[in-house]
Amino acid sequence: MRESRSNEPTVVLGGTGKIGRRVVRLLRERGVPVRVASRSGERRFDWTDRTTWEPALRGARSVYLVYLPDLASPDAAPRLREVGELAVSQGAERLVFQSGGGWPEAVPAEEAVRKAGAAWTVLRPAWFAQNFSEDLFLEPLRRGEVRLSAGDGGEPFVDARDVAEMAVAALTEDVHAGRVYELSGPESLSFGDAVARIARASGRDIRYVSLTPERFESELVRTGVPAEFVALELGRFAAVRSGAYAEVSDGVRRVLGREPRSFAEYVRETAATGVWANAG
Ligand SMILES: NC(=O)c1ccc[n+]([C@@H]2O[C@H](COP(=O)([O-])OP(=O)(O)OC[C@H]3O[C@@H](n4cnc5c(N)ncnc54)[C@H](OP(=O)(O)O)[C@@H]3O)[C@@H](O)[C@H]2O)c1
């Protein structure tokens, strides 16, 4: 009979990020042993430094995989395959991969995780609502102007808390093995609508400026974004403009048995924290 593995950790790669830290908190609340692995985590793990991989994965029972810097880069699939196989060689039985919703460029990375040799689950979240309060859109909002080439394309922003709950379900329940879940919020919004809602809720005048792709590209280059990532960003916003990501999906309801949190709820709660107050 197999010995109990209840002391072996779930390794959360990217466990300090927007989804990862919520996954860590939820697992620990359930008493699941967790190892937070990232460049600044409890255990150092760096996708660009192979020497950090094995120590981070040692003895893992399951692994949550968050890949940086970009799922679409050619390094993503081979690194995910190697890390996945290494995790399996350490005894990991489950791999849960944070991919991206409607991103054909992430499919090779998903394939790599699926072939690593463990039970796998792929999460394909839409853009996170929390990008507006914990990431790249926060400073522009504080300054009062968000400049993007998203046009009027819709995006069904998903709440990071829902993605984290989905991750925990996939890490702790056998029924999700071999499944791919598309995760979105309950409605699609343009970036202009999203910014307008945040402006209203925080009582501020914040402009959304719709840039041409050429203008967006020159602004990204000017702010020092490396050429490789400029191309990826342009491609992603072209897809937003075309409406390619706009479809709402039902993964959250199917797995968690309730409606996903709405953008309105996220905006109401987040505005109350004062995070969108003027940069001064
Ligand atoms: N943001 C979105 O709206 C969105 C939507 C769908 C899918 N995704 C995908 O989700 C993934 C994570 O995005 P995110 O927005 O959740 O990122 P995030 O909140 O910035 O979290 C990134 C995490 O990865 C770690 N990290 C960064 N570079 C690393 C490296 N070289 N090696 C190891 N760990 C590294 C960070 O911690 P340290 O700094 O400590 O290393 C952090 O814990 C990406 O693959 C992205 O494509 C994002």
Image (cartoon, rainbow, N blue to C red):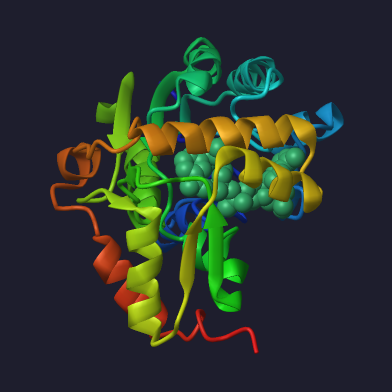
* x then y, percent, for residue 232: 62, 31
* x then y, percent, for residue 41: 71, 54
The residue at 66%/37% (across/down) is: 68
- Name the quadrant of the C terminus: bottom right
**Viewer-nearest residue: 24 or 49:** 49
> Which picture quadrant has residue 212?
top right
**Viewer-nearest residue: 80 or 52:** 80
**Viewer-nearest residue: 114 or 225:** 225
The answer, for residue 3, to whether it is visible in the render is no
* x then y, percent, for residue 185: 26, 50
- Name the quadrant of the N terminus: top left
In the image, taking residue 153 as reference, residue 28 lies left or right, namely right
The residue at 22%/53% (across/down) is: 260
Image position of 110 with respect to 152: above or below: above
* x then y, percent, for residue 267: 34, 72
In the image, taking residue 188 as reference, residue 216 lies left or right, namely right
- Which image quadrant shows ligand 1? top right
**Viewer-nearest residue: 94 or 201:** 201
The answer, for residue 245, to whether it is visible in the render is yes
The residue at 63%/22% (across/down) is: 80
In the image, taking residue 194 as reference, residue 65 lies left or right, namely right
How many labels sit on residues? Answer: 0
The residue at 79%/50% (across/down) is: 222
In the image, taking residue 137 as reference, residue 183 lies left or right, namely left
Image position of 53 with respect to 210: above or below: above
